[in-house]
Image (spheres, rainbow, N blue to C red):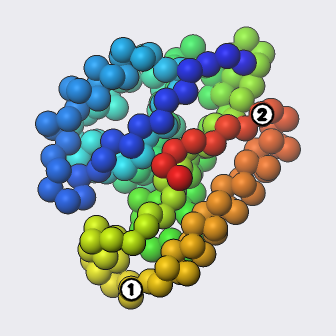
Amino acid sequence: IFMRIMTSNMWGDFFNNPTALRKDMLYRIYRKYNPDVIGFQEAAAGWYDVNIFWKLGEEYNFVGTECCNHTNSTPIAVKKEYTVIAKGHEQLKDTPDWSKAITWSVIEKSGERLAVCNTHFWWMRGTETDEVKKSMGVQDFTIEDHRQLRTSNSIQLSELMLYLHKKYACPVIAFGDM
């Protein structure tokens, strides 16, 4: 199956970086490159509020925007010419940040099938990480704790990919902010 896949870290609205100022620019980028599948990361509440997904909905079906009370930060957009066979969403285990998840979909066109997984792994240490952990009441992590979280994220994604490959007998592609 030939297709264009785009991954797009939208840079959520977590730290007073308003989405309204960026929505038109991102929309123009999506239209210019016209991907068949877009995997979004950091699609925080502000992105749902400015209706970028609704605007893209003229050409795309969405996977993951219907779940999680519009708090899924890793939704997927699939061109309407593809049929969504199956879909799902799961939080990354052992990760103290609700925005770290995997959204997946099995899509089909002209009898060809493909599974796609979009994710946003746990990030590195830094001021923003410390602010998120503090807001969630999580203690500071060591460098080794961060390595273990990213390893755990990788294992979870790999297990999901293997499951999708076996269940749907198709290739699986993963992308996102890893």
Label 2: few (<14), some (14–19) or many (≥20) C-alpha neighbours in 10 Å: some
Q: Is residue 92 above or below residue 161?
A: below
Residue at horizontal 53 percent and vertical 80 percent from the top: 145
Crowd around label 1: few <14 · some 14–19 · many ≥20 (10 Å): few
Q: On the image, which quarter does residue 151 sit in? A: bottom right
**SS class, disc 1:** loop
Residue nearest the observer in this picture, 114 or 2: 2
Q: Quadrant of residue 81?
A: top right
Closer to the chain start, of discs 1 and 2, is 1
**Is residue 138 toward the left or the right of residue 158 in the image?**
left
Q: Is residue 99 above or below residue 21?
A: below
Q: CA separation, marks 1 and 2?
A: 39 Å
Residue bearing the label numbered 1: 140
Q: Amino acid at mark 2?
A: Pro
* Residue 171 circle label: 2
Element marked by disc 2: loop
Image point 37% across, 22% down: which residue?
30
